[in-house]
Image: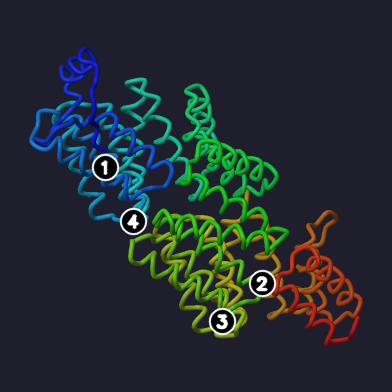
Amino acid sequence: MKQSGNFPAPWLRRAATRRMFWTDGRSGFYPLPVCRRKAELLELTGAWAEAEAIYGQCLEWLAGGPKQRLAAEVSLSLGNLLRKRGMMERSFHLLEQSLALLESIGDEQGQARALGYLGLAHAAISALGPAVDCYQRSIEIARRLNDRRNLLPALGNLANIHIQQGRYEQASRNLEECRRIAEAAGDLQKLAGVWGNLGSLNLCQGRFPRAERCYRRQMDLASRIGDKYNHCYAIGNLGIIHQRHNYGQARDCYLQQLSIATELNLVQGIMDALGNLGPISYFSGEYQSSLDWSRRQLELAQRTGNQEAASQALGNMGSVCKELSKLDEAAGYLEQAVAIDRQLGLRNFLCSHLAFLADLRYRQGALADAAALNGEVLKMAAEPGLEAELYSARVLEAKLDYTADQDRGRAVLQRLWRDGLGDDEAALWHYEMYRMTGSDEQRIRALGQYRSLYRRQPKAQHRDRITEMEASGGT
């Protein structure tokens, strides 16, 4: 960090004139722009503790001096780094202090940057309303100044909230604008993040090949520039793609994600990795391991105030307890998850958790509650990206009808059959028709469907249905 040696006199005079150097009274000079750039590169490559120390040293040099704008810029960099590391109290203090200073000196470009970072801090503790407000204010200033550098991250982060809340068209417009800006600027780090967000948008809409292509572009760019932050998220995103066909590959990706995030002390990355390892263990039938991963995620989420991660953990814990027939415990977890989802407007999480809770209430014999919850799912799942939840809700509707009038229930289920059903939906249809009618023909068809599904994706839940139907009449 300390720069010494014999600098050419003309260069030294120019540097001194521009106030690029500070001294601590000993021999040697401290070139602040060089140190800032070093901290930025260390942050990019994952040496966050060292980057934090350099940012802090820069602030010490600037303390009490005339360079208020420069001090605010360094404070913003440090505040955002602390946000990544989960040090939210210090992060908010620095970001809010910097914003106030920038407002007092009329630096609008600095305000746009500060508001973008504050939005990220609010989003990290699931304060989505304040986050949206910050992003929108940042976008408004950046557009007025034609400041694409600050416009891009604010648009992209606002798109993330649109995705979480199911506003896919708005998210798509934002992200396409981000991609054009990043490509025009040649900013590979920002472009990697944009491709990751585009992957998530396509994933939520069920466009899996497109999502995979986006995530691979994110991975390639992150690897090219040594960006560990984007690499951490890219490897986790690819795990989600692998999870559709290969649990072993998916688990390896999630464990790599956890290792990188732990090395970086990237709190959000750690929570995301834990949030992926819980469900993959659930689908593999490793229920105790799944609970352990989710409890770790829940503990970290509660400690950092991340309600979205808490909802994810609670939802998985409810699903596991449901499989273990701990129905009251499962209901408690799912009800907590639903309450968070409603508060934050997390459409996809809410729909999934309501569907699990509705089925749980049906199993408990609370049919009125099950019908009310299922009615909510039917309304929500009519929108794109929730086709699986919609079909499951329609099947549950038929089962509820069956409890009141068996002929009507069978007729409702019969109408749900159509050519071109997906394999999961077809297997579910034959299984429920077998349960309603006792037809051995339906049992054999359902058994064949679930065996085929299990060969492609060894879900423990598919295995359990295979075992049940084999016990009822062999092959």
Residue 294 picture location, percent across and down:
49, 71
Gap in angstroms between the C-alphas marked 4 and 3: 41 Å
Question: Between residues 361 and 51, which one lies in front from this camera angle?
Answer: 51
Q: Earlier in the sequence, mark 4 or mark 3?
A: 4
Residue 368 picture location, percent across and down:
56, 77
Q: Does residue 207 appear left or right of residue 27 in this picture?
A: right
Using a 10 Å C-alpha cutoff, classify the residue at mark 3 as few (fewer than 14 neighbours), some (14 to 19) or many (20 or more): few
Indicate whether 356 appears above or below 111: below
Indicate whether 366 appears above or below 55: below
Amino acid type for the residue under numbered disc 1: Ile
- Location of mark 2 (residue): 284
- Residue situated furthest top in the rendering: 10
C-beta proximity under 8 Å, tags 1 and 3: no
Q: Secondary structure at mark 4?
A: loop
Q: Secondary structure at mark 2?
A: loop
C-beta proximity under 8 Å, tags 2 and 4: no
C-beta proximity under 8 Å, tags 1 and 4: no
C-beta proximity under 8 Å, tags 1 and 2: no
C-beta proximity under 8 Å, tags 3 and 2: no
- Location of mark 4 (residue): 86
- Location of mark 1 (residue): 54
Q: Earlier in the sequence, mark 1 or mark 3?
A: 1
Using a 10 Å C-alpha cutoff, classify the residue at mark 4 as few (fewer than 14 neighbours), some (14 to 19) or many (20 or more): many
Gap in angstroms between the C-alphas marked 1 and 4: 19 Å
Gap in angstroms between the C-alphas marked 2 and 4: 31 Å
Residue at (45% x, 65% y) in the render: 311
Gap in angstroms between the C-alphas marked 3 and 2: 29 Å
Structure colour scheme: rainbow
Q: Locate the N terminus and report the quarter of the image it occupies.
A: top left
The mark closer to the camera, 4 or 3, is 4
Q: Earlier in the sequence, mark 1 or mark 4?
A: 1
The mark closer to the camera, 1 or 2, is 1
